[in-house]
Image: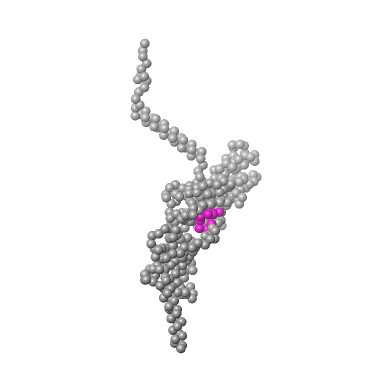
Amino acid sequence: MKLFRPSAILRTPTRRDLLVVLRLWLIALLVIVAALALAVPSALALPLSEGDRINVLVDEGSEFSGKYQVGLEGDLVLPYVGAVRIAGAEPAKAAEILAESLVAGRYFRAGAARVSVQVLEWGPVEVTVSGAVNMPGRVRINTPPPRDRAPERTEEAPGARLPERHLSDALRAAGGIRPDADIRRVQLARGGATREFDLLGYFDGTQVEDTPLVSGDVIIVPLTGVEDPRLARPSRLTPPGVRVFVSNLTQPAADNNASTVNMGGLSFAYGSRFSQAVVAANCAGGIRATSAGRKAVLVRTDRLTGEIRKWEGEIEQLLTPQSAEANPILLEGDAVVCYDSTVTNIRDVFRTIFDIVLPIGIWR
């Protein structure tokens, strides 16, 4: 009787066998990635909103084809069919909705309606931004330039102008985020649902999901209560600069021209601090005996609560390393005032007394 020899069946895999297995694994991986890409819709695809101009093509349905504009309620009015809500849907999804409406109206048999939707012009949208931004409130984004509003424009090619109606566009239109914003938990409310977005990538270079917006969206930027220096620099989410009102009078002036007051304020790069405004206002430097003891005051009105905050300190201390709390980052509309030192004040008191006593002595 012959004995069973495993070596007759099992053999050492060759290099060709390993390449075949590796190729099969790569094919399987590509199939899985493609399936996930088809199953999960892209978060960056731009949905339709009110005011968008689109071109609808219906195969063998010329009476339904034509150029339309999404109405204020987010509806598109098709002939004979009536209003069909497509706001919030991407163009491909909107085509499916219109096809279903044609079938429901018995203008086509099930599966026979073929519809294509192409965007001719992305309209402006209005959204509400609140929280840690410089100018909270309702903002309008993606407003076309004046030359594009002319009646004689002939922009009929789909995608003629790239839209600017994403989350970052709305934050920038609201004056940009403040240094105390929690940009890792920015909230977007739409249709009763709320999502959170992490926008830190605009500052550290990581990937960011800049989601598109539709009219009626509500954006909330939470407050942290602590200023983050990483956020205090020009970026897509922050303003390029701020205006600060300064005053540095060594003696009272009779008018603004005499005191060379700039009624529009001084411009500073975003991220500048209290100490830099003091230097720009010429409050620092000069004779140490008379200038070293000068003081500066920063006054700020919180645009969210209306609360008035005040920082006060000696200029010499502002120019030396210290805590960030004592040297805050400048925000739009801050006011900086410089006061003379004790030596200068005493000197002016004696000058005042001398100016009063001398005329009396001469008169006598």
In the image, 362 versus 271, the foreground residue is 362
Q: Quadrant of the N terminus?
A: top left
Q: Answer yes or no: is residue 98 visible.
A: yes
Q: Answer yes or no: is residue 161 visible.
A: no
In the image, 314 versus 35, the foreground residue is 314
In this view, 33 is above or below 286: above
Q: How many marks?
A: 0
Q: Residue furthest top?
A: 1
In this view, 295 is above or below 69: below
Name the residue at 46% across, 70% down. 261
Looking at the rendering, the stretch of residues picked out in magenta corresponds to: 128-136
With 106 as the anchor, is 197 left or right in this view? left
With 51 as the anchor, is 297 left or right in this view? left
Q: Find residue 161 and report its horizontal and vertical position in percent.
A: 50, 52
In this view, 15 is above or below 246: above
Q: Find residue 209 and report its horizontal and vertical position in percent.
A: 48, 47
In this view, 2 is above or below 17: above
Name the residue at 57% across, 46% down. 193
| Residue 133 included in the magenta stretch of the image | yes
Name the residue at 51% across, 55% down. 132
Q: Find residue 197 and report its horizontal and vertical position in percent.
A: 50, 48
In the image, 240 versus 353, the foreground residue is 353
| Residue 64 included in the magenta stretch of the image | no
Q: Residue furthest bottom?
A: 364
Q: Find residue 304 and report its horizontal and vertical position in percent.
A: 54, 58
Q: Quadrant of residue 323?
A: bottom left
Name the residue at 57% across, 41% down. 96
